[in-house]
Amino acid sequence: SKPRSRRKVLLMGRSGAGKTSMRSIIFANYIPRETRRLGATIDIEHSQIRFLGDLMLSLWDCGGQDVFLDSYLDAQRDNIFSEVQVLIYVFDIMSTDVERDGYYFNRVIRCLCDASADAKVYCLFHKVDLVPEHQRQTVFEERQRRVKETVKPFSVKCFATSIWDETLYKAWSFMICGLIPQLSKLDGALSRFCEISEGDEVVLFERATFLVISHATLHSHSDVHRFEKISNIVKRFKLSCNKNQSHFHSLELRNSQFLAIIENFTSYTCVLYVSYRSDIQSTAVKLNIQCAKSLFE
Ligand code: GTP
């Protein structure tokens, strides 16, 4: 069937910030190490990404060398900035050319404001792995403050990201979820499933990217990044299965305290089911998962 919603997403920022790297990891099954081989993007690379069947992302990865940026802001301006739903602007957090970074960002925001005033703006302060851990929060807050000042009257949501850990999945899950039509329906179905099957935690992942789409949780947990860590780990496991010409189907972990099952679910999703009941049978859980499918197709 044809997807019903098409969304234009601009991925912008100066050369070397890491735009193509993140796109390749999330959508094209690269592992982080492989991004070292990527060359600079020449002009714009367009990709059409189908997400959950109903959503078509039209992702414009805009090469960030100054000559290209100058051209986007001038000759190509109408074409690029019209009908944009989301701008993802990537800063290299280690950049020493902060003034010029700010200059281009400011101009991009003005063009967006003129042509697509309703667009959502996200800023990623990227390569945060290169900042010593004890300084990360301060550096991030300082950068965020400056950006928020620039984007007025837009509001902006900022993330500190790295291809080397789960922060990349956290940011992209958040940004893409904002585009999913009827996300609340999925949230509702997942909560119901969690309740009926007496699960302690159930999480829905998009199958190809492993981005988190929705979760239902009975208890609060201290590790707020736990789902994205799982995205990162399971996606790597899936990719290593593919390398050996085998396909991921499901994964079951059990100790004396919990049972966790990750399994392919609908055509577009994977599900993670966690139970802290020691007497629970995995066959029963798997049967429940099969029965719940129709709620999500
Ligand atoms: P243009 O195509 O010229 O606009 O550049 P780009 O923004 O697409 O940069 P690209 O993705 O090509 O990445 C440049 C370099 O940064 C690559 O060598 C990546 O391996 C590296 N890189 C990307 N993300 C990270 C990160 O999170 N941490 C670190 N340390 N390096 C990164």
Image (tube, rainbow, N blue to C red):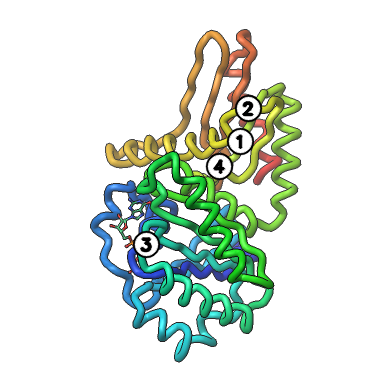
User: Which of the marked residues, 3 or 2, is nearer the chain's N terminus?
Assistant: 3
Is label 3 in a helix, a strand or a loop?
A: loop
Q: In this view of the protein, can residue 167 be seen by the observer?
A: yes
> What is the distance, in whole Å, between disc 3 and disc 4 at their CAs?
33 Å
User: Picture coordinates of residue 29 (x, y %)?
Assistant: 37, 50
Residue appearing at x 55%, y 52% in the figure: 141
Can you tell me which quadrant of the image ligand 1 is in? bottom left
Instruction: Name the residue that disc number 1 marks.
Output: 203
| Cβ atoms at labels 1 and 4 below 8 Å apart | yes
Looking at the image, which is closer to me, 150 or 43? 150
| Cβ atoms at labels 1 and 3 below 8 Å apart | no
Residue appearing at x 62%, y 24% in the figure: 287
Three-letter residue code for mark 4: Phe
Mark 1 or mark 3, which is nearer to you?
3
Three-letter residue code for mark 3: Ser
> What is the distance, in whole Å, between disc 1 and disc 3 at their CAs?
36 Å
Is label 1 in a helix, a strand or a loop?
A: strand
Residue appearing at x 50%, y 65% in the figure: 89
Instruction: Name the residue that disc number 4 marks.
Output: 205
